[in-house]
Amino acid sequence: MHMADALVSPAVGGLFWAASAFLTAKSSAAAKNDNMSRGTALMGVLAAFVFASQMINFSIPGTGSSGHIGGGLLLAILLGPERAFLSMVSILTVQALFFADGGLLALGCNIFNMGFFPCFIAYPHIYKRITERVDGPKGIMSGAISASVAGLLMGAFFVVLQTTLSRITALPVGVFMMLMLPVHFAIGAVEGFATAMVIIYVYARMPEVLNGGSPDKPENGMKRAVAVFSVLALLTGGFFAWYASSSPDGLEWSIVNVTGTAELDAPHTLIHSLLSSLQDMIAPLPDYSIKGETYSENMETTVSGIVGSIITLTFAVFMGMMFSKRKNRQ
């Protein structure tokens, strides 16, 4: 669901850059006062794991499309909404800057769509309410699927809204909406199931992680979680991503079914041209391939997955350390 700059006008892009910057500042202020005193390392490895997991597109039967997890809900359950949102900022920024995945002008839209709705709407108002009423794995499963579907549908709706408000494409809003929502409903259901399976494992084996790693809880589970998700991030990005579906993702599939092509030309505005040139210049691994070199697809995927996971981990850990330092100074 990464939007390209071809879908977004400078006005809409600027508006959602401002909205995402505001949410980042608010999340930063809240995160420095939370109880996750030992959660910085976990924040980093979970961000790396979600980055790697987003490289794996799974097929949606009967549609010819594919999808990948967003990861916002999983992060919110394990880290809390504020640190989860900041982790999504890290992931999407790394994808845009280093892999040209999602436009720079559209980065604010992508952060808002994939971060705000799962972290601040779906998690507290759907997942938590269901799991408070239904205990154990059953509550986790029903809560994760319901929240994931809702969060992804809200994000998909805003993709259509942002595209429509931008008024730089010929995508008819009704048809675009009718394609986007059903396919993202299916993607959300798969993500919800996958999220639930991860949380059920954590619930059974490392329950203290779900308590935010507070000082009065044992640290063994937190250390085990860091180790487990570190290994999973490297395996997912370095190996499992080889088997990702080559079908277009839900957004690309919807655009293809409306326009006949997944590649829309960006308007020839100064801002679009400057940002496109900047992204081409700075992204060393565009489309998860090695710029200027020819290697096997699996080799390029492995390099992209491992390098991207390490960069994302570093970015997220740096943000977490900044919060800890600010909190200690106060």
Image (cartoon, rainbow, N blue to C red):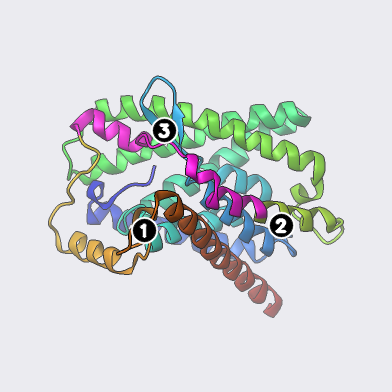
Picture coordinates of residue 21, whole percent (x, y): 43, 61
Residue annotated with mark 2 = 226
Mark 2, other Cα within 10 Å: few <14 / some 14–19 / many ≥20: many
* Residue at point 62%, 37% (across, down): 195
User: Considering depth in this image, is 217 or 53 the residue closer to the camera?
Assistant: 53
**Magenta region:** 231-260
Helix, strand or loop for the magenta stretch, by majority: helix
Residue found farthest to the left = 268
Picture coordinates of residue 37, whole percent (x, y): 74, 64
Mark 3, other Cα within 10 Å: few <14 / some 14–19 / many ≥20: many
User: Please, is residue 237 above or below residue 167 in the view?
Assistant: below
Q: Quadrant of the C terminus?
A: bottom right
Residue annotated with mark 3 = 66
Q: Is residue 318 left or right of residue 247?
A: right
Marks 1/3: CA–CA distance: 27 Å
Q: Is residue 137 left or right of residue 160?
A: right
Q: Please, what secondary structure does the residue beneath circle 3 have?
A: strand
Q: Is residue 41 left or right of residue 150?
A: right
Picture coordinates of residue 250, whole percent (x, y): 37, 34
Residue annotated with mark 1 = 17
Marks 1/2: CA–CA distance: 32 Å
Q: Please, what secondary structure does the residue beneath circle 1 have?
A: helix
User: Considering depth in this image, is 79 or 191 the residue closer to the camera?
Assistant: 191
Quarter of the rendering containing residue 127: top right
Q: Are marks 1 and 2 in contact (CB under 8 Å)?
A: no
Q: State which tag comes first along the sequence, 2 or 3.
A: 3
Q: Is residue 17 left or right of residue 32?
A: left
Q: Nearer the viewer, mark 1 or mark 2?
A: 2
Quarter of the rendering containing residue 100: bottom left
